[in-house]
Amino acid sequence: MTLHLHHIFVCTSAGAPEAEALLDVGLVEGSPNIHPGQGTANRRFFFESGFLELLWVHDEREAQSALTAPTKLWDRWAQRGRTANPFGICFSSSQGVDSNLPFASWAYRPPYLSEERCILFADKLPLSEPEVFALNWPQVQWSPKMEPMCHPLGLCEMRSVSVGLPDPTSISDSLSEIRDAGLVKIHRSIAPELVIGFTSQQEVQHCIPALGLSLVGRPDSAA
């Protein structure tokens, strides 16, 4: 079972006005989505592999329900910019993912998924670190007919992510397992940030302070 980056989310203000910063640097926006029963909504930017999700809570009651509360999505969104890390990192596999992940996990079954599907959340990650989770069902490649994937900025495939934290030497056991499995890198950063590596048509390096993101593209597979 080989895990690949499926998408990355960033908690934003309601309606994600921060998306304008992505549009300004040359990304093309795809379709939005709502998660019934979970209380969240999003705006999305798709690539040849992976997508970037700007996520907010639109229904506080659903987001704080007994079913959704263990995901900490409400806490992560409500406390963003203060005590909570605003990021989430999702992995998937073309063969599907089982519970034999390189990190301890628990199964979340939201009402918008069919009965046989679930999201496997990494266990015991503190709010000061990004959320990490995996989709258990097999993933297929998107078609350009479904979502826009050609961006003037030139970014193609989402390949890697490095997590910026104030003290990389003091992280949870769960995040240590995720790092040691080669799924993420960790670097030092005064404020929480993600550096996302892409394959690209040209050298790209853009910092998006409004989202705490750096987008780095290289013309080869070393992104």
Image (cartoon, rainbow, N blue to C red):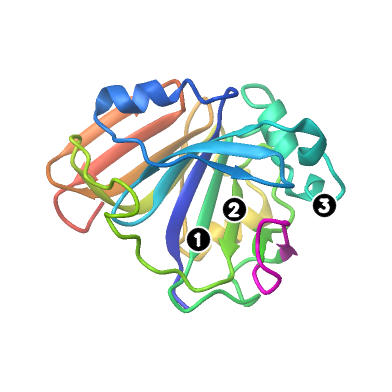
Q: Are marks 1 and 3 in contact (CB under 8 Å)?
A: no
212 horizontally vs 23: left or right? right
Q: Which mark is residue 67?
A: 3
Q: Is residue 217 above or below residue 23?
A: below
Image x and y of residue 165, in percent = 54, 36
According to the picture, the residue beneath numbered tag 1 turns out to be 91
Q: Residue at x 74, y 33 (%)?
A: 59
Of the two numbered discs 1 and 3 in the rendering, the one whose residue sits closer to the viewer:
3
Of the two numbered discs 2 and 3 in the rendering, the one whose residue sits closer to the viewer:
3
Image x and y of residue 131, in percent = 62, 47
Q: Residue at x 49, y 74 (%)?
A: 138
223 horizontally vs 164: left or right? left
Q: Is residue 208 above or below residue 175?
A: above
SS for dot 1: strand
Q: Which mark is residue 71?
A: none
Q: Which residues are magenta?
A: 106-117
Amino acid type indicated by mark 2:
Val
Q: Give me the C-alpha separation between circle 1 and circle 3.
A: 22 Å
